Image (cartoon, rainbow, N blue to C red):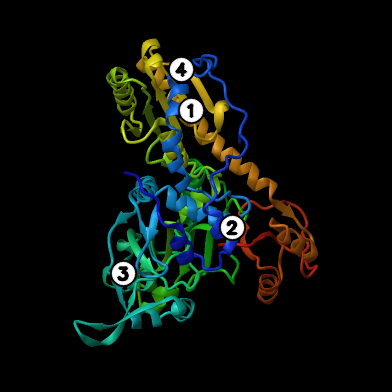
Amino acid sequence: MVSSLRLPTLTSLFSPSLTRRSTLSLRRRLHLGPPLATGFSSQSAAPSPPETEDRVDNKKSSRVQDRANAERVITPRSPDFNAWYLDVIANAELADYGPVRGTMVIRPYGYAIWEAIQEYLNVKFKETGHSNMYFPQLIPYSFIEKEASHVEGFSPELALVTIGGGKELEEKLVVRPTSETIVNHMFTQWIHSYRDLPLMINQWANVTRWEMRTKPFVRTLEFLWQEGHTAHASPEEAEKEALQMIGVYTKFAYEQAAIPVIAGRKSKVETFAGADRTYTIEAMMGDRKALQAGTSHNLGQNFSRAFGTQFTDENGQRQHVWQTSWAISTRFVGGIIMTHGDDTGLILPPRIAPIQVVIVPIWKKVDEKTGVLDAASKVAEILKTAGLKVKLDGADQRTPGWKFNFWEMKGVPLRIEIGPRDVSSGTVVISRRDVPGKQGKVFGISMEPSILEAYVKDRLDEIQSSLLQRAISFQDSNIVDVSSYEELREAIFLGKWARGPWSASDADELRVKEETGATIRCFPFEQPQGIKTCLMTGSPAKEVAIFAKSY
């Protein structure tokens, strides 16, 4: 039995600022938006015939049960993006709330998306020479204090353990907010000579940061991530590593998550506490806010000097190592939801979807059931053998109409329908999640294994490409080039991203944040040519910056 979450509780837990109107909107029936694409063509597709008799009759018989779908209400995205986001997480069964305010329980479907992220990145990390390991979750407080800017940056977010085994501890322990300190403590014991370098490790772990304003996946008290840590014999090697890893994240965003990102360098104000330079990938969400989707830090020698992490170089001289750290977290799951989802619910890029194809068998009479289920099973086996992630939903408890709505809401890229007439003709009906309604439905696709496999794989590739192109178009249409502070203010007021030349001070940057709510997201790696004049001061500027409101 499929159950839905109690959304008012989830809403009040993570977003106490939701209005009464937002809460009431959770009870409205789902309204589908207009088609998002104009359809697609295929040489193997037959013209769309009228609805078959078994489908028409099935629609009539499912009306009573479809009333249950009213419980799975999703607030329309445009009027209340935050309520829509919470509704999707609840109804798509991605996460539930934990007993401690600001925590969440990641449900199997949500965790499967995270696993897809892990699987891709784990391969890339190992290809680039990194090894997985694990560090303790509890860190002595004295470690945090060793790097001044680090403790200053993280102190407001620290969770401390002061009692253990019923006794007060001699030294407070920090529940891991990040691992640079404990990593350096261990690196100091492992690194002695230049022959021990580079040392490149990664860990998959949970971290705790005592956030005051939380949002599921995007900002929670505890979250999952990977954090890479490397030590090098020269600053050039460390810089190369930091840039390489932000490149890995950029490629993942584009090729797997179908999310366009702007890669660049953080401003001094936004740089990670304890780093010389921070590199970032910034993604535009459906409400046009920025999401910092991944970061890579060149730590220089800041932590190695604080912890005495040294090596003997080839000339016999003692030197401090140069270091990097880099991370992507479960907030990327939130980014996928907010980039691709629509009023119906999730839309998942095929390469990270836990289920790429769902098969819904349709029968009206008892004597039709066996033939339809047998055909559906054969189709499922064909596609599984081809390496695809397939779900056959043959349950009797729900009607096909309910199943259509349910799997669309969960964002499954392709749906295959098989009824008695399809069995007789040896064909199936295939619907695309990213193209709503009849435009996304194609009849008469042959069940012959080679034809079906090729057709399904081609459609999945099309969906992956279409989602990326749609997101790129949305991003490009919402970035405004500005040349003055007034133009920047106007762009931010309209909910856009502002891109303009910048060489002003940290104080000016903080003024922009105070007056507009926007921050410098990054100085993009891709910079326009020509003479530039700072939009704030009128002085010469070497590069442009991206300003936006963010999560």
Q: Nearer the viewer, mark 4 or mark 1?
A: 4
x then y, percent, for residue 409? 46, 42
Nearer to us in this view, 190 or 335 = 335
Label 3 element class: helix
Residue 56 in the figure: left or right of residue 266: left
Q: Nearer the viewer, mark 1 or mark 3?
A: 1
Nearer to us in this view, 404 or 155 = 404
Q: Quadrant of residue 105?
A: bottom left
Mark 3: few/some/many CA within 10 Å (<14, 14-19, 20+): many
- Work out whether 114 lies above or below 376: below
x then y, percent, for residue 513? 66, 70
Residue with the mark numbered 1: 431
N-terminal label among 4 and 3: 4
Whole-number angstrom distance, CA of label 1 to CA of label 3: 53 Å
Question: Residue at coordinates 30% horizontally, 55% vertically from top-left?
Answer: 131
Q: Nearer the viewer, mark 2 or mark 4?
A: 4
**For the residue marked with disc 4, what is the amino acid?**
Glu
Contact check, label 3 and label 2, Cβ < 8 Å: no
Label 2 element class: strand
Q: Is residue 205 visible?
A: yes
The image's mark for residue 210 is: none
N-terminal label among 1 and 3: 3
The image's mark for residue 290 is: 2
**For the residue marked with disc 2, what is the amino acid?**
Ala
Quadrant position of the C terminus in the picture: bottom right
Q: Quadrant of residue 309?
A: bottom left
Q: Nearer the viewer, mark 4 or mark 3?
A: 4
N-terminal label among 2 and 4: 4
The image's mark for residue 187 is: 3
Question: Residue at coordinates 44% horizontally, 61% vertically from top-left?
Answer: 10
N-terminal label among 3 and 2: 3
**For the residue marked with disc 3, what is the amino acid?**
Phe
